[in-house]
Image (cartoon, grey):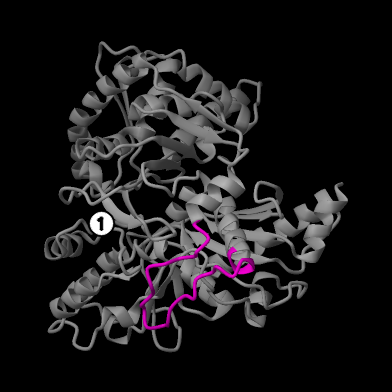
Amino acid sequence: MNPQLASQIAEGRTALGIEFGSTRIKACLIGDDPTDVLAVGSHEWENAFVDRTWTYALDDVLAGVQAAYADLVADAERRHGAAPTTFGAIGVSAMMHGYLAFDASGEQLVPFRTWRNTSTGPAAAELSERFGLNIPLRWSIAHLHQAVLDDEPHVPDLASITTLAGYVHRRLTGRDVLGVGDASGMFPIDSSTGTYDAALVASYDELVAERAPGLRVAELLPTVLPAGADAGSLTPEGAALLDPTGALRPGIPLCPPEGDAGTGMVATNSVAPRTGNVSAGTSIFAMVVLEGALASAHEELDLVTTPAGDPVAMVHCNNGASELAAWVGVFERFAEAAGQPVSTDAAFQALFREALSGAADAGGVLAYNQLAGEPIAGLAEGRPMVVRTPDSDLTLGNLMRAQLYGVYGTLALGMRVLAAEGVAIDRMFGHGGIFRTAGVAQRFLAGALDAPVAVGETAAEGGAWGIAVLARYLVEASATGASATGASDSGASGPGASALDLAAWLDERVFADADVETVAPDPADVAGFAAYLDRYRAGLAAEAAAVEAL
């Protein structure tokens, strides 16, 4: 045990990050040095498909965060002999978008509608045309507008809507605020003001004036805050919620709650223009920080922001590595049935290595990983499939390469649109558990994007570490007297975050000595994936037919 690290924990010279992923709630504790991960905790959970809606129960949200926090405390005690009772700062992050609706007394009006739902097509189409920019199906404003179009009975009772991170932050602090990156997945942001686009707010209120009299969208949305702003402090009720044992003390400052896209940018040092990252989990998405506006709107691209408020083009796909994990589970069970059981990690490593032996184009084997609807692919619902022609070469290597290529399939369709816009990328970072097996998923992603891909030592920690770093940024910005003043609760904020520039702080304070491995694209992989993608695009007709038939 390191006495210095134990002292940091005991004295609260730490930052706690909590992130709600699709299948795991993760907690990450960092020390004075943001690269020191002192303890971690996690809790497995899963969404439910209820009445044709993907959802999580809020009771599971609260029970899950308590379990993840307790696991982190136990890990700190095991590793350092010290249990935390306070922190320098706390940050909360979660899956972006979706629809959490509450009345004036704070009662939930309808079950949580997550980003995974694709039932908002009419609303998204109408808003995209009216606003002149792409409003994706999963955005909160699309969910709200669909409820208005459907004359849902809860709409007149609406007092607030928020995201999952905003909900948990509200329960911990009592403040209805949101980081600008997460807010940009609720309603379009004007990067010059750092808050919701005032012209579009007025346009929306005008649009629904007759159908939903009295609805004022700005009054429903959380206050927008940039990274480094004061987002409130842990209340006694919040401390008891997070730690029912009573050991955790209230009064701890919290940074603005962020979405998983923003924490992914932080975790990969991708908040400066011409940088980008790919986050691979249950969903997969790419973020590229822009130097200027795009020439036109594209349905494949979302315009969101970094946690500091800079414009970002986002390619978001609802389906990531879940189907790949299911196939690995099949082979793991085969090994067990054959009397040669292996761990899940060993199964992933063996199958990923086997993928390297596959043909560059996967031998004519196609894998579609759509468990849920996929707007970029034009699919209202998911139908996972493996498809091949009679002359294809079905080997284990080709099957596993096709599965890995399938994770990147719809992402690559969107990235081709961004490339056609002439957007330049100096560096692309990958993060998420898929990159834990060195040299495979990273190499294939470089081939899919035809660009160098870097993976750092924090790739597996991902967004939980990223939001912990944003919490540390709040501490250091406050210590220098450079923190932002924030905004009023009316939903308006200034354009500035902190005088302590986030991109520079990450470069100099967090990533200066980072262990990052960069893989350049292999020309054979580039050509092979391009051939695979051509067949993949053509084969989407079979996916669409399966949706119609089943």
Percent of width and height locating residue 211: 15, 81
Task: Please state which of residues 462 and 372 is positioned toward the viewer in this rendering.
Answer: 462
Task: Please state which of residues 84 and 113 is positioned toward the viewer in this rendering.
Answer: 84
**Visible residue check, residue 24:** no
Percent of width and height locating residue 472: 62, 59
346 left or right, relative to 201? right
Q: Residue at x 71, y 56 (%)?
A: 72
Percent of width and height locating residue 48: 44, 58
Q: Is residue 402 magenta?
A: no
| SS category of the residue bearing label 1 | loop
- Give the prevailing secondary structure in the magenta stretch: loop
Within 10 angstroms of label 1, few (less than 14), some, or many (20 or more) residues?
many
Q: Which residue is mark 1?
A: 136
Q: Is residue 490 magenta?
A: yes
Which quadrant holds residue 437?
A: top right
Which quadrant holds residue 120?
A: bottom left
Task: Please state which of residues 169 and 456 is positioned toward the viewer in this rendering.
Answer: 456
On screen, residue 529 above or below 30:
above
Give the extent of the magenta segment. 477-501
Q: Residue at x 15, y 49 (%)?
A: 296
On screen, residue 534 above or below 121:
above
Percent of width and height locating residue 506: 54, 49
40 left or right, relative to 405? right
185 left or right, relative to 509? left
Task: Please state which of residues 451 and 411 is positioned toward the viewer in this rendering.
Answer: 451
Which quadrant holds residue 88?
A: bottom right
Q: Quadrant of the C terminus?
A: top left
Q: Residue at x 59, y 51 (%)?
A: 465
Q: Tell me which amino acid carries mark 1.
A: Pro
**Visible residue check, residue 546:** yes
